[in-house]
Amino acid sequence: MEAQSLFDRVQAKLAENSVDRPSGKTANGHVHLLEGLLRCAACGAAMTIATGTSWNGGAHFYYRCGNKHRMAATHCNVRDLPVWAVEVVVDQIKMLLSTHWLLPAR
């Protein structure tokens, strides 16, 4: 009987802690729509989101090779790509497309 009670409490805690995330998961309130779509140039694995904290407590987000993440850098040694660098490229593409009348101007 005690084992069943413990099992039920654990299941309730797991349900409480679980979070359903759509594609383009959020990490600290930021949506990363390209996660899983970007591919590692070295090995072809999907890029996932990794986070880091600077000395002053600021959060930094990176795209990291999935193989590097899963295999502790034994299968791929490519450097992490800062999310801001990808966003700059995406913004430049949006600007180019909007200046050529392919996207509505905002």
Image: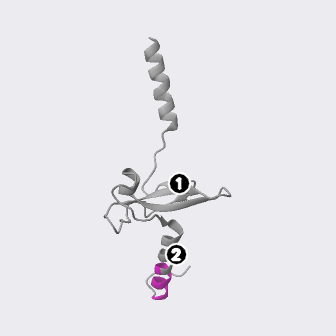
Q: Which residues are magenta?
A: 93-100
Q: Which mark is residue 88?
A: 2
* Residue drawn 38% across the image and 66% down it: 38
Q: First in sequence, mark 1 or 2: give its number.
A: 1
**Magenta residue check for 41:** no
Quarter occupied by residue 29: bottom right
Give the vertical position of 62 relative to 15 (above or below).
Answer: below
Position of residue 23 measured from the top left corner of the image (x, y, whole percent): 42, 56
Residue sitting at x 43%, y 60%: 64
Instruction: Decide: few, some or many residues near mark 2? Use Cα within 10 Å; few <14, some 14-19, many ≥20.
Output: few
Quadrant in which the C terminus appears: bottom right
Q: Nearer the viewer, residue 22 or 53?
A: 53
The residue depicted at 49 percent of the width and 28 percent of the height is: 12
Element marked by disc 2: helix
Tell me the tag on residue 27. 1
Give the main secondary structure of the magenta stretch. helix
x 44%, y 53%: residue: 22
Name the residue type under label 1. Answer: Ala
